Image (tube, rainbow, N blue to C red):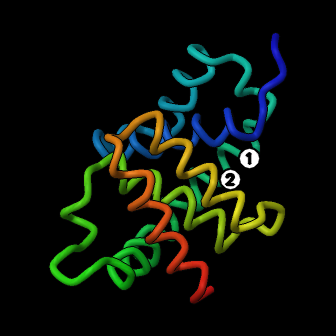
Amino acid sequence: MKKQSRSEAREAIFTQVFQFATQRDNMDEARHILLQEMPECEQNLGYITEVTEGILEHEAEIIDIINAHCRSGWNFKRLSKVTRTILKVAIYEMKYCDDVPPKVAINEAVELAKKYCDEKEPSFINGILGSILKDL
């Protein structure tokens, strides 16, 4: 089995949080499916579980942070589900993961946006997270 990087684990977190946000599946079942599809996630399962569950536990606070940093006329509900999920992962890491430098969380969020969003989203996500970083 190939070694899984933290970036790949972060992408797995993204898929787990996105799945839960869109379907409200049982997280244990979703994690089981993740491990079937990506067995290398076993190497980072503790981190994936910690961050996924942490995002769900602090979701209301994270949404409030996003709303506080959106431009006038925008809010969390107007953002795409993919953008919401990427922001949730990055903000959780910035605020609660002492072993993840905030700039790394931002860079990883931008990379996920480049992969899963349209061409305008990476700079939007970078701007929101940069603003949040100043307040943290």
Towards the viewer: 72 or 50: 72
Residue at the (36%, 85%) spot, across then down:
68
Residue at the top extreme? 1
Position of residue 80 measured from the top left corner of the image (x, y, whole percent) = 26, 51
Q: Is residue 121 left or right of residue 49?
A: left
Residue at the (28%, 68%) spot, across then down:
76
> Residue 50, labelled with which disc?
2
Name the image quarter holding the N terminus.
top right
Residue at the left extreme? 73
Image marks 1 and 2: residues in contact by CB distance under 8 Å: yes
Residue at the (39%, 43%) spot, across then down:
20
Q: Tell me which amino acid carries mark 1.
A: Tyr
Towards the viewer: 16 or 85: 85
Residue wearing tag 1: 47
> Residue 37, labelled with which disc?
none
Q: Is residue 110 left or right of residue 41?
A: left
Q: Tell me which amino acid carries mark 2.
A: Glu
Position of residue 104 relative to residue 33, above or below, is below
Position of residue 70 measured from the top left corner of the image (x, y, whole percent) = 32, 77
Position of residue 123 measured from the top left corner of the image (x, y, whole percent) = 43, 58
Q: CA distance from mark 1 to mark 2?
A: 5 Å
Name the image quarter holding the C terminus.
bottom right
Q: Secondary structure at mark 1?
A: helix
10 Å crowding of disc 1: few (<14), some (14-19), many (20+): some
